[in-house]
Amino acid sequence: MERTTDTIAAVATPAGPGAIGILRLSGPEAVSAASAAFRAADGRPLEAHPPRRLIYGDLLDREGAVIDKVLATYTRGPASYTGEDTAELHCHGAPMVLSLGLESLFSHGARQARPGEFTRRAFLNGRLDLVQAEAVGDLLEASSREGARHAAGQLSGALSRRIGGIYSALVDVMAHFHAVLDYPDEDIDPFRESELEVVLSRQAAQLRALLATCRRGSQILHGLRCAIVGRPNAGKSSLLNALLGYERAIVTEIPGTTRDTVEETVTVGGTLLRLIDTAGLRDTPDRVEQMGVERSRAAMESAELILVLWDSSSPVTQEDGELLSQAMSLAPTVLVRSKSDLLSAPLPLLSLDPMPPVVELSARTGQGLEELEQAIRSALPRQTGEEAYGELLTNARQEEAASRALERLEGAQAGLSAGVTPDALLTDVEEALSALGELTGASVREDITDRIFQGFGVGKYAARADLRVRALSLFPRYSRPIRPSGHSTATACPRI
């Protein structure tokens, strides 16, 4: 395994003033560099103290002058986040203090970390696989309780273990076949095609079940597309503002105010929703408004939840009924009778099967918002249980790799039914293993890993370095080291 020989440092907290700011180091000289920039209150060097303890003292600039009172700690590799020696200096979060502290660390042999380089080193040193590394980024960007819980479960290895079960079963098939082939004189159970058929069928079913989680995983992390639709002046923008808690969309009594879709994210009823406020649906000679109407219909067709608004202060029209029927044919739907604080027209008898949840709501007073949350819960399909947190595919890269693995297993199944010899069938199994290896990081291109880790960065620092990457397998029995080379330019200081 290739080892890094340089020491990196970065500000590990968000940019801007704050109560706490952290300087983080990793590498062979991490502890000595931190010790040179830190003077403990008891006069002893940092490394003379026990690891994983917070030591009080002074942070020194590159000339040795005191710039802050801080706490310092260090951890020896491989029992650290990156698998290397690491150190942290916990300062006050003044940008100047952090800048001077970082300069001091640079003067003692550290260099500026590239975007995501701490997590990259954890991956290269076998502390995380690629799925777990992606979960770090998902955790940083989580905007809902569900998203945070799912990312934490993935970071703890839930998805990796699920993939590992499939991987291990296929490796056992490969090992058994080659053992029989290479050691015919040994007392090894014969390789039976019937047993291969069972294994292929079971693991293909596991992959199909895994791929079925993609949509749910994306919804948890990025939100469920929710279109708010209705005739002009039905109260769509008022509802958007009420759910967000501030004036995001312009609201007037003039029909056709909204000319384009307006998107915001908010948690409603425990579900992260990507709310899409749309232009009022009507025939109009105004070309600009007509373009807005076209976008509104496109948003409704791609939505995963639709809130249909009927103005309860006006009689229901044929267009209202047609819109509700269309929405119900596209996605789970909630009928919202808006402006309930005004004189309400009677609700017509609806003969719909199934009947959508109906909510009487006033965006002005807030009456009915709790009922809307409950209606959204009831309108959506039953969600995945808590036991599945962390076991869902959440991005296109993971889905593509799992799809290729399934395709190769289905190819092996077809070949088995057609009477193809086991050695030819196992070529497909080997390619399935390779695809699963890409999913976890056993075999992956450098441009993919660069894209993943660079997504973690914030800040203004830049660096350029020659990268030599060796992707490590979570399952060492069947790893294929990849050694790409080339140059990569980073433009940000990493969070992790």
Image (spheres, rainbow, N blue to C red):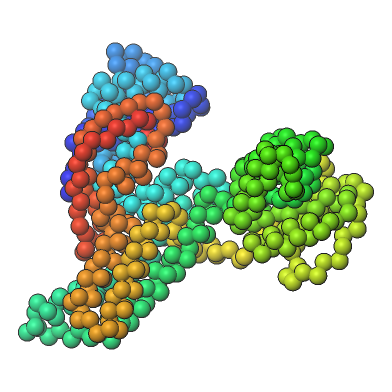
The residue drawn where x is 51% and y is 51% is 221
Find residue 230 and report its horizontal and vertical position in percent. 75, 50
Quadrant hosting residue 43 = top left
Q: Position of residue 339 (x, y in %)?
A: 84, 47
Q: Is residue 461 left or right of residue 333?
A: left
| Front position in the image: 114 or 29 | 114
Foreground residue, 166 or 31? 166
Image quadrant occupied by the C terminus: top left
Residue 204 vs 235, above or below: the answer is below
Q: Position of residue 103 (x, y in %)?
A: 32, 20
Looking at the image, which residue sits at the far front?
Answer: 285
Q: Name which quarter of the figure residue 70 lies in.
A: top left
Whether residue 371 can be seen here: no
The picture quadrant where one finds residue 316 is: bottom right
Q: Is residue 477 above or below residue 220?
A: below
The answer to whether residue 214 is seen in the rendering is yes
Which residue is depicted at the point 15% across and 75% down? 178
Image-based side of 147 in relation to 494, left or right: right
